[in-house]
Image: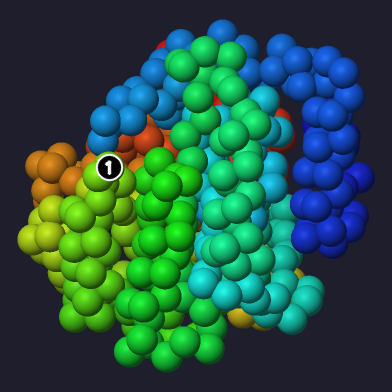
Amino acid sequence: MYKLLRSILFKFDPEKVHYFSMHSLQLLCKIPFGKNILRSCFATAATYSNPFSIWGISFKNRVGLGAGFDKNAEYLTELEALGFGFVEIGTVTPKAQSGNDKPRAFRLPKDKVLINRMGFNNVGVEAIAKRLQQWRANHQPQTPNHKLIIGGNIGKNKLTPNQDAWKDYEICFMELHDHVDYFVVNVSSPNTPGLRELQEKDALGLILKNLQRINKEKATPKPILLKIAPDLTYPQIDDVISLAMEIQLDGLVATNTTVLREVSNSTKEEVEKIGAGGLSGLPLKNKSTEIVKYICEKTQGKIPVIASGGIFTGSDAREKIDAGASLVQVWTGFIYEGPAIVKNICKELA
């Protein structure tokens, strides 16, 4: 059924389809019994059969939704009804920004790929914090074991110079601290000019050490993770690991999108027509798994990893967990496989 619907939706602009689909789910959830219908179809017993605890947080399952899908924390109720164990909102920046010019999202269906150059479009941290506060106040999980875990993915505004980037991360951290369960520092998106330069050890150390200092002063410190690019060299990954161990970072997210275009089935003309942007989807699967395995072996499992990249099926998720990942995130797989992806993965993991 979803394949038929997908064939129709894929005839239209990806960004417009995204908002159309999620707004349709919102309407369904507002209809009496609509949310229960979604839950009965997708948040089945399988999605609660493999709970997992880490950082003192109990996840109802290991399958989450990566940042960039629900940038402004608008669809938490709907995503919870689809069975997700956790949702990472954002990337959130201090000030609202519109992002890059449209069109800025593209598909290569023959390779199960998405390419985007969104550019951290979001409504700003104050509006998102207020929305999260309202959602938590009005939302009660069916049971404590059904709670949706929320991660806050934070970044810098496009116009903020890199030497002041640490201030943007601090602002977002302070504003969201009471409203999210964990944080992810995003310095690895390819769609904000100069952002990936912040992955260098000195620049990264300034950001992360400052957040750790603030976090330790909080009554309830929150786990802080770092999201890394798949395009880092292994010496650069070693630098990240060294810093993470030094400052006792809580974990890593591996990986973000890639600037490479290693596709097998799309033509060179199709790829070049799209232009710049980060590629996600099936071609990223093996590289992401290699990096997850490298980190977990290098650290002897001392730094937990959330695996992201090329996860479409339960066997893809199992591959990441066998490589050492604690949790997995889907994004492009959700678009191509449809709303049953969490249920299907959880069945495999169980």
The answer to whether residue 110 is seen in the rendering is yes
Across and down, in percent, residue 122 comes to 64, 66
Q: Residue at x 57, y 20 (%)?
A: 141
Between 151 and 11, the one lying in front of the other is 151
Nearer to me, 257 or 244: 244
Image position, residue 297 (x, y; %): 14, 45
Quadrant of res 268: bottom right
Q: How many marks?
A: 1
Residue ID for mark 1: 220
Q: Quarter of the image containing the C terminus?
A: top left
The residue positioned 63% from the left and 42% from the top of the image is 134
In terms of image quadrants, where is residue 140?
A: top right
Nearest to the observer: residue 138 or residue 273: 138
Mark 1, residues whose alpha carbon is within 10 Å: few (<14), some, or many (≥20)? few
Tell me the residue at 86%/39% (across/down): 24
Tell me: 74 left or right of 181: right
For label 1, the SS is: loop
Q: Quadrant of the N terminus?
A: top right
Residue at position x 72%, y 72% from top?
A: 104
